[in-house]
């Protein structure tokens, strides 16, 4: 028998062998655990030790010290390839920055598993680039290696992270790793600070892609990787609606998971202040439609922050105590989220997942006024 605190129940979370899960999926599938798996760290560090024999790293046919190795790997596609826990980084940043970024990514893995009711079976891939200039070149033209741009939708234009829907890893037999891309410019304090936000956002995008791939569209793309990319089919296969995907990424980026506890409340307050300055959360019909527009960065950013705040509201942490103080209607939202999670966990037909997502949206619409009130009163 499980024993749950009132705050956990109201937040829709219960303890399950050291992790947390939505009550309605307890017992219907494998226990949810964070994406960091036992044994990963040791094996990865053993590989690192071999790589860094006598303080030298393998860089093509030669071995170099760390400074020269960082310089060697600063160019696409000679990036570092480093795995930690639930995430793999292809990075042109320094090795130290890359490992710090991976630590930030793994800090949100468990929260994402609890939100979606499952975790990826393999590490999710994040491409981490060292500057905005390199990021722009990769997103728009992959100018450094002469490939098709990985961003078929143009979404890199208004943010510092984007899903790489059109990217195939040609060094791994045209594998589609479901990557997301971000940049972390460690040359300045501001660049380092924003890099942490970007890394969390990209990690969440990659996590969702790992649990919600598009196998039919990708099979077609692999047959002719130099041809047109089936964007409509790729995104049309998804079970997770776009608002929830971007909402989860913005939630991880700005609303608490993985943030330094000493600054998390200030970051959340600052984000909600930004939302207020933009006129408050967008209507939920607009959020659920989630019509991102690369030519309208202000509107697209407003959509992302609204969706992030909605996911925070969904899991009960838009404020420190909103779930504890406002339990009315919580059961309907928890039940709807649990049904959606179950459809992902059991690999139900896509249409079943979409119907479950629509029921979740309906439950949230019933609480739209409360969501808006909390979002505007939570600073």
Image: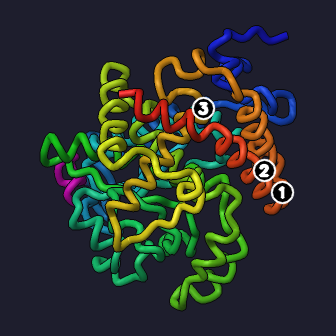
Q: Which residue is mark 1?
A: 352
The reply to whether residue 324 is in sight is: yes
Q: Which residue is mark 2?
A: 356
Quarter of the figure that contains the N terminus: top right
First-in-chain label (1 vs 3) = 3
Instruction: State the SS at label 3.
Output: helix
Q: Quadrant of residue 128?
A: bottom left
- How would you rate the neighbour count of disc 1 (Cα within 10 Å): few for under 14, some for 14-19, many for 20 or more? some
Tags 1 and 2 touching, CB below 8 Å: yes
Residue 217 shown in magenta: no
Circle on res. 373: none
Is mark 2 in CB contact (under 8 Å) with mark 3?
A: no
* Image position of 65 with respect to 213: above or below: above
The stretch in magenta equals: 64-71
Q: Residues within 10 Å of mark 2 (few under 14, many from 20)?
A: many
Real-space Cα distance between discs 1 and 2? 6 Å
Kindly identify which residue carries mark 3: 315
Spatial CA span between label 2 and label 3: 17 Å
The alpha-carbon separation of the residues under discs 1 and 3 comes to 22 Å
Please determine whether, in this image, residue 140 is positioned above or below residue 299.
below
| Residue under the point 29% across and 44% down | 277
Which residue is painted at 40% across and 44% down in the image? 280
> In this rendering, is residue 223 above or below 86?
below
- Specify which label sits upstream in the sequence, 2 or 3: 3
Residue 66 colored in magenta in the image? yes
The reply, left or right, for residue 280 in relation to residue 134 is right
Q: Main secondary structure of the magenta part?
A: helix
Q: Is residue 253 left or right of residue 262?
A: right
């Amino acid at each position: 028998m499980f024993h749950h605190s009132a705050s956990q129940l109201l937040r829709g979370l219960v303890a399950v062998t050291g992790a947390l899960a939505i009550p309605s999926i307890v017992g219907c599938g494998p226990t949810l655990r964070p994406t960091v798996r036992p044994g990963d760290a040791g094996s990865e560090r053993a590989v690192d030790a071999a790589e860094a024999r006598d303080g030298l790293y393998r860089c093509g046919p030669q071995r170099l010290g760390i400074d020269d190795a960082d310089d060697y790997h600063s160019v696409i596609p000679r990036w570092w390839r480093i795995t930690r826990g639930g995430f793999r980084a292809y990075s042109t940043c320094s090795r130290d920055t890359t490992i710090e970024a991976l630590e930030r990514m793994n800090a949100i893995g468990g929260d994402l598993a609890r939100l979606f009711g499952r975790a990826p079976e393999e590490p999710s891939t994040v491409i981490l680039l060292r500057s905005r200039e390199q990021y722009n070149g990769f997103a728009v033209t992959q100018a450094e290696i002469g490939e098709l741009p990985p961003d078929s939708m143009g979404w890199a234009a208004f943010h510092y992270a984007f899903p790489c829907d059109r990217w195939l890893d040609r060094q791994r037999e045209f594998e589609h790793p479901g990557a997301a891309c971000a940049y972390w410019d460690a040359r300045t304090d501001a660049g380092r600070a924003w890099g942490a936000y970007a890394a969390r956002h990209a990690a969440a995008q990659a996590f969702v892609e790992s649990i919600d791939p598009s196998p039919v569209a990708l099979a077609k793309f692999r047959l002719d990787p130099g041809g047109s990319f089936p964007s409509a089919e790729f995104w049309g296969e998804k079970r997770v609606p776009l608002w929830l995907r971007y909402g989860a990424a913005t939630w991880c980026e700005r609303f608490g998971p993985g943030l330094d506890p000493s600054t998390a409340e200030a970051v959340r307050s600052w984000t909600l202040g930004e939302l207020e300055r933009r006129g408050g959360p967008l209507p939920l019909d607009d959020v659920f439609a989630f019509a991102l527009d690369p030519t309208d960065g202000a509107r697209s950013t407003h959509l992302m922050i609204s969706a992030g705040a909605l996911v925070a509201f969904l899991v009960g942490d838009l404020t420190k105590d909103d779930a504890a103080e406002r339990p009315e209607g919580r059961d309907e939202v928890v039940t709807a989220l649990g049904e959606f999670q179950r459809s992902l966990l059991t690999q139900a037909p896509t249409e079943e997942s979409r119907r479950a997502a629509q029921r979740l949206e309906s439950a949230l619409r019933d609480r739209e006024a409360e969501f808006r009130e909390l979002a505007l009163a939570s600073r």
